[in-house]
Amino acid sequence: MKKLFMAAMLTIVTAATAFGAASRAGVVTVDVDLSAQEKGKEVKLWLPYPVSDANQSITGISVTGDYAESGVYTDRANGSPMLHARWKGDATSRKLSFTFAAERQEVVRRAFPDKEAAWDPADYRQYLAPTSLGPTSGEVKKLADSITKGKKTVLEKARAVYDWTCENTYRDPNTRGCGKGDVCALLEKPGGKCTDISSVFIALSRAAGVPAREVFGIRLGKKAEEDITTWQHCWAEFFLPGYGWVPVDPADVRKAMLVENLKLDNAKTKEYQEYFWGGIDPYRIALAVGRDVVLNPPQAGPPLNTFGYPYAEVGGKAVDFYDPQGFRYTITYKEK
């Protein structure tokens, strides 16, 4: 028993060491320039707005620009904060700079209780419900039941879904952005990026009766100064009764496998799989949760599939946030 315990601890320590320090701190600056967009139109901008929580500290917030008005709001369904700014139709320059200092801790949540606490699924209906691209019925339900067959507890079901997701998806580097997270399409072709792989875990978990949600954020640099404009990242959490929200990141398991050319049976793959079960590295900050998002103030367009990127509308029409050349913005990280 002692040898097994030491082996397990060595696996966790080895994986954790691969990510460096247990915390990461620096200054993030988001610079947006919408001046080149169509003239004579009202322009609106929404940015994900990080806040302090148990795992991250956000301080030194500064917002400057030539906007007509700005404010910080939250969406009603998920409570995700956002910075909103508006420029009038006669504005000739539309610039905004948003800066904040962030300190993020490594999160390790594996001290699971021996016995599952009593809970009422009605209290977590939001995290058991389907979304527009993440159904919980039909083929998704059938697959979830197959994966969790014989599993009785939330923890057992969540682990079964996590392992299946790690072992049956793959990272497709050609996916645009973080991916759409279209679960039905992904069950046909299970390749994508972080939103795709996280969405598979979440839809299957919910279909199996496990409350789960996405967390949208952005990675922090590992160098003293880096351009992190395209470093958005999504991971998942499931709710364990009597314990709380537990992070999992099957997408980073698959990313490590691709980058390091690892097979499923490689010992290092298993280390990553164990580390990202209840653990996430400190090189990221959380920005928002939720799918099918109605912003605040509401956008003119349809609900957003996700809110991990800057979003803007010119004359009520959305600007492509996946294109930082047309939608001109940069996000930089500087070590404190």
Image: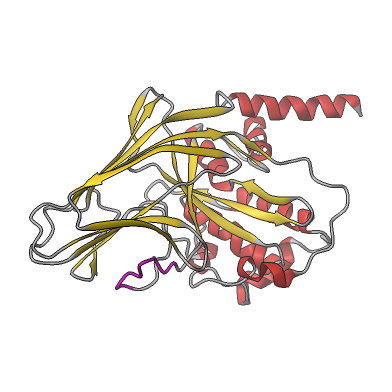
- Taking the spot 41% from the left edge, 52% from the top edge, the residue there is 178
Query: Residue at the location (52% across, 49% down)?
Result: 170
What is the tally of numbered marks visible in this picture? 0
Magenta stretch contains residue 295: yes
Label the magenta part by its dominant secondary structure.
loop
Residue lying at 47% horizontally and 29% vertically, measured from the top left = 25
Question: Quadrant location of the C terminus?
Answer: top left
Point out the stretch of residues depicted in magenta. 293-301
Q: Residue at x 57, y 35 (%)?
A: 281
Of 93 and 231, the residue lying toward us: 93
Whether residue 113 sits left or right of residue 265 in the image: it is right
Give the x, y percent position of residue 66.
Answer: 17, 50
* Magenta stretch: includes residue 226: no
Residue 101 lies in what quarter of the image? top left
Residue 210 position within the rendered picture, expressed as x and y whole percent measured from the top left: 70, 62
Compare residues 149 and 47 and report the one nearer the observer.
47
Q: Is residue 46 above or below residue 101?
A: below
The N terminus is located in which quarter? top right
Task: Please state the horizontal and vertical placement of residue 150, each as a whole percent of the image.
Answer: 83, 62
* Left or right of 153, for residue 187: left
Examine the rendering and report whether any part of residue 183 can be seen.
Answer: yes
Left or right for 86, reference 239: left
- The quarter of the picture where residue 267 lies is top right
